Image: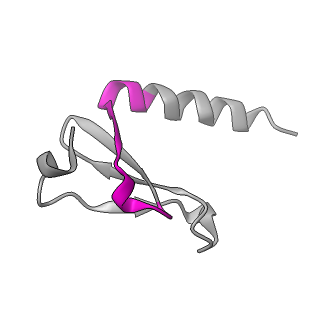
Amino acid sequence: MSKAELPDSAQWFTSSYSNGTGNCVEVADLHGAVGLRDTKDRESGLVTVGAAQWRSFIAAADELFARRP
């Protein structure tokens, strides 16, 4: 998906773990897909993944962090 194809209603969210340092990614719900972009360089483009793939990624990350000591 190109920036020109983004829905006008796309709202970007930054992780609460970013500490306001800009060292994070932003995420947007693109209605059936999820957009990811660099907080420091929002104009450089974005990556999109399907909603199912995003849910799988989040589930795997949750499982990984749950096992941390």
Q: Identify the residue at horizontal 70%, vertical 31% (top origin).
A: 64
Image quarter in which the N terminus is found: top left
Looking at the rendering, which quadrant does residue 66 occupy? Answer: top right
Q: Is residue 66 above or below residue 17?
A: above
On whether residue 1 falls in the magenta region, the answer is: no
- Residue nearer the viewer, 66 or 22: 22
Q: Identify the residue at horizontal 27%, vertical 48% (top origin).
A: 29
Residue at the outermost front position = 44
| Horizontal side, residue 48 vs residue 65: left or right | left
Q: Could you tell me residue 31's position as x and y percent?
A: 18, 41
Looking at the rendering, which quadrant does residue 8 occupy? Answer: bottom left
Q: Is residue 34 above or below residue 10?
A: above
On whether residue 46 falls in the magenta region, the answer is: yes
- Residue nearer the viewer, 36 or 29: 36
Q: Identify the residue at horizontal 12%, vertical 52% (top origin).
A: 7
| Horizontal side, residue 7 vs residue 50: left or right | left
- Residue nearer the viewer, 23 or 66: 23
Q: Could you tell me residue 49's position as x and y percent?
A: 34, 31
Q: Identify the residue at horizontal 26%, vertical 61% (top origin).
A: 11
Image quarter in which the C terminus is found: top right
Q: Could you tell me residue 25's position as x and y percent?
A: 50, 54
Q: How is the image coloured?
A: one colour
Residue at the outermost bottom position = 20
- Residue nearer the viewer, 43 or 53: 43
Magenta part of the chain: 39-55
Q: Could you tell me residue 43's position as x and y percent?
A: 34, 60
| Numbered label tally | 0
